[in-house]
Amino acid sequence: MGEQQGGPARSELVVEDLHVQVGGQMVLNGVDLRVASGEVHAVMGPNGSGKSTLAYAIMGRPGYEVTAGSITLVDDDSSSVDLVALSPWERAHAGLFSTQQYPTEVPGVGLENMLEEAVAAIGGDRSAVEAQVAAEAELVDFDPDLLYRSLNVDLSGGEMKRSEAVQLGVLRPRIAILDELDSGLDVDALAAVSRRIEQATHEDNLGVLAITHFSRLLTVLHADVVHILIDGVIQETGGPELAAQLEETGYDPWIDTRAESPVEIHLGGDPWP
Amino acid sequence: MIETQFTPDAAGAIPGPDWLARRRVAAAEQLAASPMPSVEEEVWRYTPIGQLDLSRYQLAHDGGGTSKASVPEHSAMAETSNGRLGGVEVSAEVAAQGVEVRPLGEGDAELAASVDVDRFALMNAAFSFEPLLVRVPPGVSVEGPIVVRHWLDADGGAVFPRLIVDAGADSSVEVLELYGSADVSAFISPVIEIRVAAAARVGYLAVQDLGPKVWHIGSQVSHIGAQAHLRSSSAALGGEYARTRLDTHLSGRGATGDLISLYFGDGEQTLDFRTFQDHAAPDTTSTLLFKGAVDDSSRSVYTGLIRVRPDARGTNAYQTNRNIKLSEDAWAESVPNLEIENNEVHCSHASAVGPINSDQLFYLESRGVPTETAERLIVAGFFDEVLDQFPVLDAVPAVRDRLQSKIEGLGHRGVDGETGS
């Protein structure tokens, strides 16, 4: 929910040496990332590599404890916000937005109801929300009848993600973290939602961090930068060609690299050659 | 322990038809011989019943003020004040249909045969001044609810309202009962009897919004006939100790009973519900949904029993009780039970007591909704499922508003034992 006056603001999400612990286990072991306005980054990795943890840690989900490193939102005037010190809703007010792989059902709370409260909390005009929701719903072909259902209750995978695209359109964040956007989604819905997100990267300078297991997503949501995350560390960063390579080889090359790394050799006096 | 003021003599002195006077005295005599309940008994477990000192209360004789509780458009309305029946108005249209809304009279002796489920129902039988009858003739559909509005402002008063809803075969009616009080210390023990004859449809909603020093110990007994349908619901919001016992007898083949309630405790309140779904006939269905929240140092108790008798094959019976615990000091107890004596049945029960769902809270917060606002949205949303199923639709907005004002009282509290980073 960045300030929109005077054209879209430019900012950068800066993740440095991020270490995150979940339930007593270290899951992220020093992640470095920079996502600037207008850019689309993909973080790819196999199951258990720490992808969702990265998304939750950036948004501040309780239980995802940052033990070292930093998450900062830096504005083009060089002012910066330490996001780790903020609650999830304060992070949202700073300009973050996240979608979940399986969005939580919230019985009895409607989409518009929630957005009105979110908009009112930053001093926005709650009465404008209804029209904005209607306009955004049309952009992603979200059935207007579903707007009156409880959040994510009795919605298909595609409808849930369309609903999240509507939320993104109304809230106009600076940085969106999309966790497995393509999971449980039909082709049409994925195309509609991806189109809306790309539009936001052009028109509102939205920066995107898309977390995904498969390169399928990147055929519709075009990434500028691709990161490979394995065992809680970014193993490699490159352009879209990295996703193409991944499609050929799977994650094995990077997992093998790790197995051969010196990290494995500190087993002390084991008599192995 | 015998309370000197609640004697057979006092019961006999209440004016009314002879049959009723005799029943009052008989009930008072039985009362004198029955001990006060104690928490040792399962049905009184978890309650503050040991603190009840009936000698603090006097049988109220005189009406006081009237309730200001908002009333939806209705077909008939009766008012009580301190247990005394005041005005009764019945629309000409409904009166022409033969619908009766009136105190029991000489010719109603057959209505004496009721079951007194506990000592307080017995007190009600002995000391209810003007038991009210709502009778709908067979085949008549009443348009618009029949409203009974109670008001209590006698400090130290004890009152015993009684309502009998008698829905004839294939009739349909909705009844709304509203309970309110001034900020007095008082005791109210209402009894509601609902008779739903074959193929009749009855909707009942009680809104209990008594003051914080009022004790409420009520019971409702219903009998549902063949192919008949009762939807009985309540919103329990007020009272110091407020208890309702519901005995729902599915007596005729194909009978259906839906029991839908919400409760919200705050301050020092104790809200207590005992339910009994009694399947006595084949192909009967009962669904129960009770949802509550406890805040501050309030407490709630839900215990429920589904009983399927040997003849009641083809029974469908469901029981769900969910509670949100909104503060460290609040406490909720939920004890569902099944007693099944026939194999051809579908029964289930579910119960839960827990804090606000942390995943739901995170979802709303991640959109920029501040924590306390998000908590209010989630708690209000939690009750939506109940409000959506209430009968007497026009009464629901007022219940929603009153519930919302209780929810607005929410302060900040921990969720699932965790706080934001």
Image (tube, grey):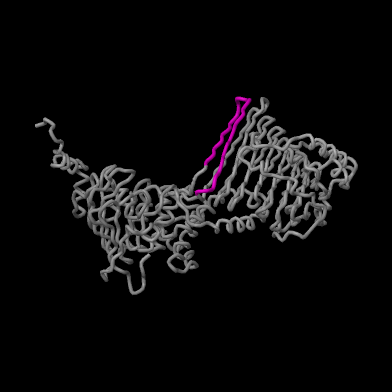
Q: Position of residue A192 (x, y in %)?
A: 37, 56
Res. B137 visible in picture: no
B262 or A67, nearer to the observer: A67
Q: Position of residue A246 (x, y in %)?
A: 21, 46
Horizontally, is A74 left or right of B74 in the view? left
Stretch in magenta: B328-352
- Report the quarter where the N terminus of chain B lies: top right
Q: Give the residue furthest to the bottom.
A: A6
Residue at 46 percent across and 61 percent down: it is A115
Q: Position of residue A249 (x, y in %)?
A: 19, 42
Q: Position of residue A187 (x, y in %)?
A: 35, 49
A39 or B22, nearer to the observer: B22
Residue at 31 percent across and 48 percent down: it is A53
Magenta-span inclusion, residue A84 = no
Looking at the magenta stretch, what is its main secondary structure? strand
Q: Quadrant of residue A71?
A: bottom left
B179 or B111, nearer to the observer: B179
Res. A18 visible in picture: yes
Horizontally, is B307 left or right of B134 in the view? left
- Report the quarter where the C terminus of chain B lies: bottom left
A80 or A148, nearer to the observer: A80
